[in-house]
Image (cartoon, grey):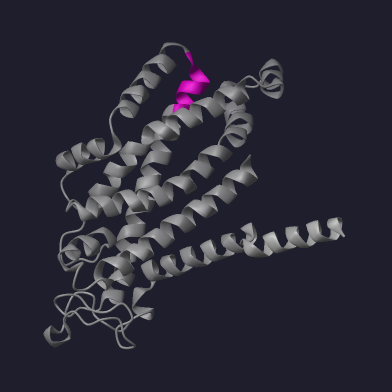
Amino acid sequence: MSAIAAVLGERGARRGRPRPAATLVVSIAVLVVALAWAVLPWLFTGHDPIAGVAADALQAPSAAHPFGTDATGRDLLARVIFGAGNSLSGAAIAVLVGLVIGTGIGVLAGSLGGVLEEALMRVVDVLLAIPGLLLALSVIVLLGFGVANAAIAVGVTSIAVFARLARSQVVRVRRSDYVEAAFGSGGSFLAVLGRHVLPNSLGAVLALAALQFGSAILQISTLGFLGYGAPPPIPEWGLLIAESRDYVATAWWLTTLPGVVVAAVVLSANRVAASIRERSA
């Protein structure tokens, strides 16, 4: 009887928590919807994200306006949907900048070694020593405001992380027996690098890129909230929350609902990244 009770208790505990596969499916669905918003926003709303109707200002969520309206009568859901394009494209640019430049630095340092490796990794250490937000703001001051410049700034903050991971993976693979055998059999440096080192060392880097995508969305939204992203009235997730902060007490939906969307997309991206990391381990 005690064994049966233990089994039933275990089954009950399993029923009480969501299965990892189910959370992964939900996360993928959330990302698919967000990407669809970014690519084809006009299919999901018939409202103009820029022009508002003064008579509809600060309406609570309803059938006509599921996310309510803002202080100028603009449909908030439409602004969130059209804002997905700016936020997600900015995150993609940021990840691409960090992935390409950081991985290139890490591969050069790990494969060539010597004085070049020491010089490159000291530069990486300097980048890691600077707080991410401060580094991003410094880059924006040099480049100017805008979603693209904010994305580049966020990408610069992730270069050091990609470089350190890429270098460690390349060094690990280079010391393996099959790479030494490839060199011993007369393989050239570039041939061994392209055929053995890179394919076996970049799996973890790609998993990091997936993880950085969610982080980049959050960082770009933060910069948008601070006023360094898209200029008004262009819809962008961080800017939407910043524009609504004066109405927290009287119109809760203006900050809460866009914040929920941002949190859902970031958490979904992190869940998918965790799954990719588990498969690549």
The x, y position of residue 239, in whole percent, is 22, 60
Taking the view exactly as shown, the residue that stands out farthest to the left is 54
**Which residue is rendered at x = 23% and y = 36% of the image?**
134
**Which residue is rendered at x = 16% and y = 78% of the image?**
51
Say left or right for 212 vs 147. Answer: right
Residue 87 vs 130, above or below: the answer is below
The x, y position of residue 5, in whole percent, is 81, 60
The region drawn magenta spans 106-113
Q: In which quarter of the image is residue 174?
A: top right
Residue 188 vs 15, above or below: the answer is above
Say left or right for 66 vs 189. Answer: left
The x, y position of residue 48, in whole percent, is 23, 80
Where, quadrant-wise, is the N terminus in this rendering?
A: bottom right
Q: Which is more toward the observer, 90 or 27?
A: 27
Where, quadrant-wise, is the C terminus in this rendering?
A: top right
The x, y position of residue 212, in whole percent, is 43, 45
Q: Does the magenta stretch include residue 111?
A: yes
**Which residue is rendered at x = 23% and y = 64% of the image?**
240
